[in-house]
Amino acid sequence: MARFKVRRQARYGILLSERFTPLEARELSKLPANTPALKLLRADRRARWERFEKIAARKLDRGQWRERDLHAKWLGNLARLYYKRRWRVQSGPEGRQPKMPKGAPNPWAMYRDYERLAPGKDYVSPWEVKQVKGGKTLLQKGLLFVQRTEKKAREGGISKPMIQSWIDQKAQAIKDARGKRRTQLVIERRRLERLL
């Protein structure tokens, strides 16, 4: 356990040195360093910092910026990126989001975007197996939902338009998912389609 903490602390330090914010580094240090999406994200952050440094050097030379404002300018740059890419907590501390207030930067939303771009995802992400109420993972909870729906449909308690809307939601989620999460969603959609 101590060895794991040391490795995670080392990853945290590396991420901070690569200009990730403390929040980003704290969350992303949970991932193995060789995760394809994290490698891609780290390379992008290094390139983004290099571009920022060049702009900052020009603005400092012209007297438009002060040295002491650089950190705030960098954070402002990242805040705009989070806003533009919609990497913010959408629904507050309830539900599938991390326990952060609504509108706060969400490093996992950023990570999921890079995960979709990364080649060869053959593992389940931490955000996919996040424990939810009742001690179930998101994958397990989705299957439980389908099982309960099947039971209610047999009893005649669910309308066909409602089932169709859930099928449509699953189809949309399948477009954004990869790996085991995608496989699970396909199974759930097929089981719901049998109820029509």
Image (cartoon, rainbow, N blue to C red):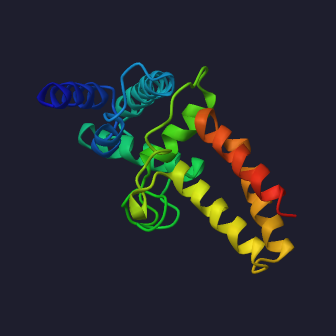
Q: Is residue 58 left or right of residue 69?
A: right
Residue 102 picture location, percent across and down: 45, 66
| Residue 134 vertical position relative to residue 54 in the rendered view, above or below | below
Residue at 46% in and 63% down: 103
Q: In this view of the protein, which residue sits in the foreground, 55 or 108?
A: 108
Q: Give how far across and how far down residue 40 sits, in percent.
A: 51, 23
Q: Which residue is at 73% across, 43% downward?
A: 175
Q: Quadrant of residue 52?
A: top left
Q: Quadrant of residue 18?
A: top left
**Residue furthest to the left:** 2
Residue ranking furthest to the bottom: 157
Q: Nearer the viewer, residue 38 or 73?
A: 38
How many numbered marks, from 0 up?
0
Q: Residue at x 75, y 81 (%)?
A: 157
Residue 114 pos. (x, y %): 55, 33
Looking at the picture, does residue 74 appear above or below residue 122?
below
